[in-house]
Image (cartoon, rainbow, N blue to C red):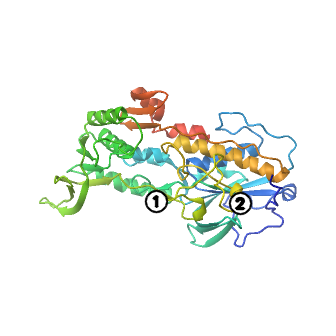
């Protein structure tokens, strides 16, 4: 059993370089709060897992049920008074709905909704939580301090913590994920991207037949029916890297072709060159390893390998591919100093199953419960009642224009307009995610 730690107390502790509370966040606590221990929770990453961890932890601190939990949480009575301070460090100035990227790329109005600035999320205006717009470059798990580079000032700051939650996700290339760090910059990229697509007189080629490539091709053809849209994939089946039945892959191909998208299988791109055509317009010449060539006005790459954003963590916390090694309770695996005070959630975690937003949100709420249990252990010395994460079976849903294909072991392969509504609704699951996390915006 761990003995209670000495938490961060607001009356005694100060960081080496203090971080200023954002506007609207009180920088001082009441006298009663100052006399109580305050536990600093640092969350790295503000996407599905990071936001879920934060909002569910707020519920638990208030004595409420965690909003996303499927099971009741039993609060312990007569706990010593204590406070928490949650800091979310994120490179972006808001939550971005990554699932909606295939639609946001071609719909400026939807793009405005898909990026929700932290200042527009009601929970972020409370006294217990703040957003730091910056990048974590290093974590010292022994001293429990993180190095943060401020997005605006570029200043190096030290952020101390009592408990760390890493939920920084995967680095994905544009246009699969935004390269912008602010909403305004993102929307300007969308305007430029949309304009270039609408003027693509020689058509658009999407390279890569994974789920994102399929969804981009289908959404583009649906929004601009007269546009020639081609998807080129290097293998003989779409979604070739996913462990789902061939029936699902075949149905996705069938539905995609039904939208009018031209699908080229076994076309591996070997070279692309920028040329000026006889009409004076620029176009791209694509050469494939089977000897075939084609010309297009625009090429969208949907094949970039996603890389875990974990370079700030010690090597002891990572596997050979950079994913975080965790215990079933989402503590870092033993071997990292103070591993019981370090948790991880979301796509950066080495775990079974296909990376999905629902899985990341589930991991976030589970981490919140276990962080709360760890705080109780620090306060009282009692053994925590941690919850373990179950294994994720291979599950997927792919939106194909006005239809969708879904697979789960318990239901098998399903497709149709009703499947699209069940998994994505009318807005690529944006409303579902906002409702699940109860963002209130």
> Where does residue 190 sit, x and y in percent of width and height?
39, 53
Q: Which residue is mark 1?
A: 180
Marks 2 & 1, CB-CB < 8 Å contact = no
The crowd level at tag 1 (other Cα within 10 Å; few <14, some 14-19, many 20+) is: some
- Give x and y (percent) for residue 7: 80, 59
- Is 137 left, or right, of 289 in this rendering? right
Task: Residue at 56% x, 59% y: name it.
Answer: 318
Looking at the rendered structure, the secondary structure element under dot 2 is loop
The front one of 310 and 42 is 310
Q: Nearer the viewer, residue 253 or 258?
A: 253
Residue placed most toward the observer, 184 or 230: 230
Q: Is residue 160 visible?
A: yes
Taking the spot 56% from the left edge, 49% from the top edge, the residue there is 346
Across the whole image, how many numbered discs are drawn on residues?
A: 2
**Mark 2 nearby-residue class (10 Å; few <14, some 14–19, many ≥20):** some
Residue, disc 2? 338
Q: Could you say which disc has been placed on residue 324 in the image?
A: none
Q: Viewed as shown, does residue 82 lie left or right of 41?
A: right
Of pointers 2 and 1, the one earlier in the residue sequence? 1
Where the C terminus falls, by quadrant? top right
Does dot 1 land on a helix, a strand or a loop? loop
Q: Closer to the camera: disc 2 or disc 1? A: 2
Answer yes or no: is residue 313 visible.
no
- Closest to the observer: 52 or 151? 52
**Residue 25, percent from left and from top:** 70, 57
Q: Residue at x 32, y 43 (%)?
A: 217
State the separation of the CA atoms marked 2 and 1.
34 Å
Pick out the residue farthest to the front.
335
Instruction: Locate residue 124, reporting x and y percent.
Output: 65, 51
Given the current orientation, which residue lies at the most extreme left position?
278
């Amino acid at each position: 059993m761990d003995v209670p730690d000495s938490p961060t107390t607001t009356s005694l502790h100060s960081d080496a370089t203090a971080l200023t509370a954002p506007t609207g966040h009180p920088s001082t606590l009441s006298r009663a709060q100052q006399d109580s221990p305050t536990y600093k929770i640092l969350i790295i990453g503000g996407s599905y897992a990071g936001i879920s961890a934060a909002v569910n932890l707020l519920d638990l601190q208030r004595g409420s049920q965690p909003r996303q939990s499927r099971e009741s949480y039993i609060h312990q009575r007569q706990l010593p008074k204590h406070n928490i301070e949650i800091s979310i460090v994120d490179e972006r100035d808001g939550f971005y709905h990554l699932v909606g990227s295939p639609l946001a790329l071609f719909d400026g109005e939807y793009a405005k909704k898909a990026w929700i600035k932290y200042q527009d999320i009601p929970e972020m205006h409370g006294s217990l939580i703040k957003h730091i717009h910056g990048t974590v470059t290093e974590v010292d798990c022994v001293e429990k301090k993180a190095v943060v580079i401020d997005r605006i000032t570029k200043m190096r700051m030290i952020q101390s913590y009592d408990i760390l939650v890493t939920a920084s996700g995967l680095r994905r290339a544009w246009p699969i994920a935004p390269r912008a760090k602010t909403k305004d910059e993102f929307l300007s990229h969308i305007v430029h991207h949309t304009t270039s697509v609408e003027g693509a007189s020689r058509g658009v080629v999407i390279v890569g037949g994974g789920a994102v490539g399929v969804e981009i091709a289908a959404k583009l053809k649906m929004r601009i029916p007269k546009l020639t849209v081609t998807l080129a994939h290097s293998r003989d089946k779409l979604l070739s890297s996913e462990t789902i039945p061939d029936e699902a892959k075949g149905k996705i191909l069938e539905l995609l072709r039904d939208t009018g998208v031209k699908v080229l299988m076994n076309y591996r791109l070997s070279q692309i060159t920028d040329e000026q055509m006889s009409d004076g317009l620029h176009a791209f010449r694509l050469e494939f390893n089977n000897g075939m060539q084609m010309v297009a006005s625009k090429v969208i790459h949907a094949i970039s390998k996603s890389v875990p954003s974990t370079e700030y963590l010690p090597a002891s916390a990572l596997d050979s591919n950079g994913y975080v090694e965790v215990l079933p309770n989402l503590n870092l695996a033993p071997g990292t100093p103070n591993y019981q005070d370090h948790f991880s959630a979301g796509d950066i975690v080495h775990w079974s199953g296909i990376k999905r937003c629902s899985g990341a949100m589930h991991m976030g709420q589970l981490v919140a419960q276990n962080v709360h249990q760890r705080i109780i252990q620090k306060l009282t010395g009692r053994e925590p009642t941690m919850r373990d994460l179950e294994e994720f079976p291979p599950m997927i849903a792919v939106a194909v224009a006005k239809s969708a294909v879904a697979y789960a072991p318990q239901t098998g392969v399903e497709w149709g307009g009703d499947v699209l509504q069940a998994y994505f609704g009318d807005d690529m699951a944006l409303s579902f995610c906002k409702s699940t996390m109860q963002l209130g915006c």
